[in-house]
Amino acid sequence: MRFYSTNRQCQDASLEEAVMTGLAPDGGLYMPLRIPEIPRAFFNNINEMSIANIAYVVANTMLGDDIDAAQLNAIVTDTFSFDIPLRKIDNRIYALELFHGPTLAFKDVGARFLARIISHYSSSLTDEVNVLVATSGDSGGAVANGFHNVPGVKVFVLYPENGLTEMQKQQFTNLGGNVHPIAVKGTFDNCQQLVKMAFQDEELRKSMLLTSANSINICRLLPQMFYYFYGFAQLSNLTDNLDNVVVSVPCGNLGNLTAGLLAKRMGLPVKRFIASNNKNDVFTRYLRDGNFSPCVSTRTIAPGMDVGNPSNFSRIMDMYDSDYTAISQIIKGYSYTDDEIKETLVDTYSINSYLLDPHGATAYRALKDDLKDGEVGMFLETAHPSKMARIMKEATGVEFKGMQTVGNAHSNHPSSIPRISSSYDSLKKILLTTT
Ligand SMILES: *Cc1c(COP(=O)(O)O)cnc(C)c1O
């Protein structure tokens, strides 16, 4: 597969070039030149297939020319060391639980696949690979964990110093070794901007191999297609109404939604998508009136979605030739306040005995608001509620104690974490001097 840049100011890249650079040299995002369709026969017995089997078929359809079958199979099998069950919430709505990985959030899937693809390519390199990731909460832990102790790789995690929960922070600040946390005095958007600047710094890129582990990296995105197919596979054991499946996605940087749209283009029969936002509703507003106006993000109780300038918007535009009418037909947008999200947490817990997390709650609520008679809904439950322990206790009274996850078994040394302002020079210095 070849990959083009959404800015179209540079040459196409191989999978290796796309994954090892993250961002295209012209500042655009890589997209597959072609989106191959999976033969219909695949769907005949998809309901009997495991997540790894499904992932292999989808991955091989897209990347079969780039990585040989046995290695690709090993990569996807390693990626899915955990299950992604579909749970019934009410008569016609199901939750796809993506939080059973080591850091309890869906980002484990993208991060684990990406880490394995990068080590596949880096094992033959003499230079070290530097992986940069900005996190609004869950990417940091997932990426750090995915790459921890991988030889030849160094990971830098930029995070807003006041934006994360304790558990989220511990998942990457306590690992040590090749994982280097950097606290930024600013928002997630500031972190994301700093990462972008590093990629555009030619001097820096001449002196070190740099790649991104955010969803700007196409290899974080592609594996997220797999679980849409797997969710559909499980759904097909529960209903015959498979032409009327509506999928709701809690959105931040729009990586998850873009992966869903790619899955649909590859042949997954999804009738439409719902993009659910919290108060950071840039994309919902775009869907309403066709104007995309990025702004500063505000903090909410669903911080993984606190994004003011979603990086994957340009990929969605590209997939639909910037055709607003087409995009607004296939995707419906909803946005909710913190109070509405909390209300959904409480109601769903008392009525359906299901404990959502605040991200999943926005997606569930949007699905309830949008679903028409005769349709079946599936939403992505992207984080385990224990990651948001304080809010969960406040809203529902449920307490999480002693949840073990990566990182939190060790002691914390916050004093040794560098704090930088949102100006680029301090980041550059750290990147150049960390050994
Ligand atoms: C990152 C994140 C999201 C948003 O996903 P995008 O791919 O950035 O749109 C939603 N929920 C949780 C729990 C997250 O960590």
Image (cartoon, rainbow, N blue to C red):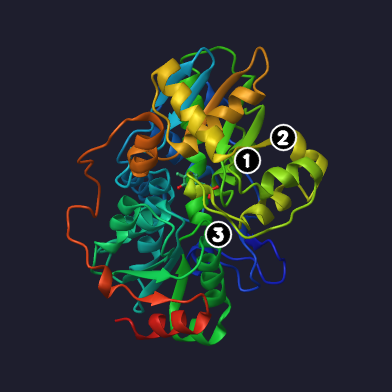
Asked if residue 308 lies left or right of residue 128, the reply is: right
Q: Amino acid at mark 3?
A: Ile
The N terminus lies in which quarter of the figure?
A: bottom right
Q: Mark 1 sits on what residue?
A: 261
Q: Which residue is mark 2?
A: 330
- Mark 1 and mark 2 residues within 8 Å of each other at the beta carbon: yes
Tell me the kind of residue under disc 2.
Answer: Ile
Q: Earlier in the sequence, mark 1 or mark 3?
A: 3
C-alpha gap between disc 1 and disc 2: 9 Å
Q: Which is more toward the observer, 402 or 226? A: 402
- Quarter holding the C terminus is bottom left
Q: Nearer the viewer, residue 391 or 127?
A: 391
**Of residues 326 and 373, the one drawn nearer to the viewer in this rendering:** 373
Q: Find residue 434 and report its image quarter.
A: bottom left
Q: On the image, which quarter does residue 414 sit in?
A: bottom left
Q: Residue at x 51, y 75 (%)?
A: 422
On screen, residue 20 versus residue 6, left or right, reads left
Rendered position, 35 above or below 214: above
Helix, strand or loop at mark 2: helix
Residue 181, position as x, y percentages in the image: 34, 68
**Contact flag, marks 3 and 2 (Cβ < 8 Å):** no
Which residue is label 3 attached to?
Answer: 216
